Image (cartoon, rainbow, N blue to C red):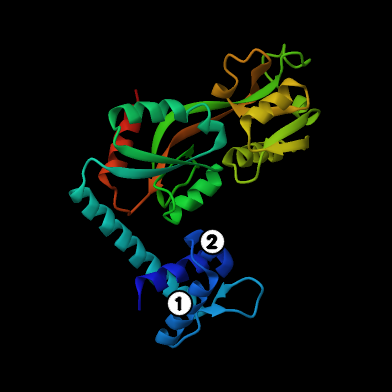
């Protein structure tokens, strides 16, 4: 049994597709197919049910995956720990950050950290908060700077700031002279929403459902610049974090009559070895410049 076989099996299980697994691992599809068949022959069981369009695990495959997930994680942690001893001044950190924070919050964090630790490489991945949490769980990311959910059983979190969710309207809108926005005004407006995969979108939808209002969603986007531009041209209103529209001449941020606050913070997976590079980033986020 080879480590490569286990890596191929693990990725095919996650993606439920051998072609996508091959693309992700940058190998040919036959390589993965042959490796998994050899693994099944060695174990004497069938790991995948191939009778369906989507690749699914057999009961035996599910048990095997659960065991090797832990083993593979331990191997990765062992490599990280050895590298820490070998080269203390080098390392790579993979960080996921939602688009809303990527343009406005992360540049300051990154530049401050880079100034202190110029030899550490930081790889940035822009995803929605929900997708980032999934990738932290599957060890694809080291950290996420996300809106912290109420429950985080598998994640460590470090709160960095508390922010208010504001209703953003065009300066020339009839709503711009309001000191707060009511549920009725939201219900009568067109809404521009973040795309699926955004925890912020979930928060907004949950709030609107609780108030029993259903404004018309006219557009969804994952790009903050696009959303602000649409608001500015009175295509609709949008719920955005307070720092997004600060000092904006064409968009005004107004509190919702029933204020919505969220905590933004650093998240990383529990029970995983924290490399010296990762610990340096955690320490920096405790006291950013």
Separation (CA) of disc 1 from disc 2: 15 Å
Residue that extends furthest to the left in the rendered view of this protein: 85
**284 left or right of 252 in image:** left
Question: Residue 101, how many percent across, how many down?
Answer: 52, 32
Q: Nearer the viewer, residue 25 or 130?
A: 25
Picture residue at 59% right of the left edge, 72% below the top: 55
Of the pair 84 and 26, the residue shown nearer to us: 26
Residue 114 image offset from top left, x and y in percent: 34, 30
Dot 2, crowdedness within 10 Å: few (<14), some or many (≥20)?
Answer: few
Vertical position of residue 231 compared to residue 40: above or below: above
Residue picked out by circle 2: 23
275 vs 239: above or below: below
| Residue furthest front as drawn | 28
Report whether 122 appears left or right of 134: left
Assess disc 1: are there few (<14), some (14-19) or many (≥20) residues with their C-alpha within 10 Å of its C-alpha: some
Q: Quadrant of the C terminus?
A: top left
Numbered tag placed on residue 35 in the rendering = 1
- Residue 152: percent from left, percent from top: 45, 47
Q: Is residue 233 left or right of residue 135?
A: right
Indicate the quadrant containing the N terminus: top left, top right, bottom left or bottom right: bottom left
Residue 163 appears in the picture as rendered: yes
- Residue 213 visible in the shown view: no
Picture quadrant of residue 54: bottom right
Picture quadrant where residue 271 is located: bottom left
Q: Earlier in the sequence, mark 1 or mark 2?
A: 2
Image location (x, y in percent) of residue 68: 38, 70
Q: Which element type, helix, strand or loop, lies under badge 1? A: helix
Residue at x 19%, y 50% (from the top left corner): 86
Above or below residue 224? Residue 137 is below
Q: Dots 1 and 2: beta carbons under 8 Å?
A: no
- Give left or right: position of 106 versus 209: left
Judged from the image, the secondary structure of the residue bearing numbered disc 2 is: helix
């Amino acid at each position: 049994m080879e480590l490569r076989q286990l890596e191929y099996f693990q990725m095919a299980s996650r993606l439920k597709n051998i072609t996508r697994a091959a693309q992700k691992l940058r190998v040919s599809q036959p390589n993965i197919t042959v490796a998994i068949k050899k693994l099944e022959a060695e174990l004497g069981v069938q790991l995948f049910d191939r009778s369906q369009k989507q690749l699914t695990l057999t009961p035996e495959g599910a048990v095997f995956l659960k065991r090797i997930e832990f083993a593979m994680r331990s191997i990765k942690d062992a490599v990280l720990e050895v590298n820490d001893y070998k080269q203390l001044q080098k390392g790579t950190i993979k960080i996921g950050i939602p688009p809303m924070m990527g343009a406005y919050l992360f540049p300051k964090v990154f530049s401050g950290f880079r100034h202190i630790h110029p030899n550490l490489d930081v790889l940035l991945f822009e995803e929605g908060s929900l997708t980032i949490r999934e990738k932290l769980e599957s060890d694809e990311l080291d950290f996420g700077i996300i809106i912290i959910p109420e429950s985080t059983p598998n994640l460590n979190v470090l709160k960095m700031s508390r922010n208010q969710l504001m209703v953003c309207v065009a300066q020339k809108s009839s709503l711009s002279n309001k000191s707060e926005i009511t549920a009725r005004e939201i219900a009568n407006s067109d809404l521009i929403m973040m795309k699926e995969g955004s925890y912020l979108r979930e928060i907004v939808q949950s709030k609107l459902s609780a108030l029993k209002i259903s404004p018309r969603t006219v557009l969804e986007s994952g790009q903050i610049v696009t959303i602000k531009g649409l608001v500015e041209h009175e295509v609709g209103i949008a719920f955005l974090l307070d720092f997004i529209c600060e000092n904006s001449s064409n968009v005004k941020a107004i509190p919702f009559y029933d204020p919505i606050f969220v905590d933004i913070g650093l998240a990383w997976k529990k029970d995983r070895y924290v490399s010296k590079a990762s610990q340096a980033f955690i320490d920096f986020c405790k006291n950013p410049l």
